[in-house]
Image (tube, rainbow, N blue to C red):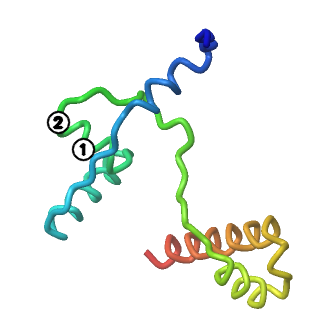
Amino acid sequence: MSQRKIPEKWQSSVRAAKAVQVAFDMDEKLQYQIRREALDNGLSPSDQIRHILTLPTAAKPKRPRLTVSLSPEDYAYLAERYGLRPEQQLEIKHRVMDELLAYSRQQLDEG
């Protein structure tokens, strides 16, 4: 079986696939401190840990974003809340985004 050459644009993905994620169980106060420093420094917690360890990090996040996992039950709940059908996942995501933006604006106005 011959090995095919991996296209140049995929080379970084190959390196990332070989990386091993390491999780640390530590005191909640220490986790909070690292997360807080990451937030203050505009970094992800992972990049903050890399910074503490003096490991290289990407200059800018490729896609800074917040994530949440939604189960089928979550979609059903949100669909009912927004007057939609659970299979209207894209519209549900739009409504969630609108709600999060409204929440953020309200918090900024109150703070």
- Residue 53, numbered label: 2
Residue 74 located left or right of residue 33 = right
- Location of residue 82 (image quadrant): bottom right
Residue at left offset 73%, top offset 85%: 76
Q: Are marks 2 and 1 in contact (CB under 8 Å)?
A: yes
Residues packed near mark 1 inside 10 Å, few (<14), some (14 to 19) or many (20 plus) = some
Q: Quadrant of residue 72?
A: bottom right
**How many C-alpha atoms fall within 10 Å of the one at disc 2: few (<14), some, or many (≥20)?**
few
- Residue 27 position within the rendered picture, expressed as x and y whole percent measured from the top left: 14, 68
**Up-down: is 72 above or below 46?**
below
- The structure residue drawn at horizontal position 28% and vertical position 44%, both measured from the top left corner, is 48
Quarter-wise, where is residue 8 in the image? top right
Q: Amino acid at mark 2?
A: Leu
Task: Say which quadrant the N terminus sits in.
Answer: top right
The percent coordinates of residue 65 (x first, y second) are 55, 52
Q: Secondary structure at mark 1?
A: helix
Q: Nearer the viewer, residue 104 or 22?
A: 22
Q: Secondary structure at mark 2?
A: loop
**Residue 60, horizontal then vertical, whole percent:** 46, 32
Residue at numbered disc 1: 49
Which image quarter is the C terminus in?
A: bottom left
* Residue 8 is at least partly visible in this image: no
Q: Nearer the viewer, residue 87 or 104?
A: 87
Q: Is residue 101 visible?
A: yes
Residue 26, percent from left and from top = 15, 63
Look at 40% across and 30% down and name the residue there.
Answer: 18
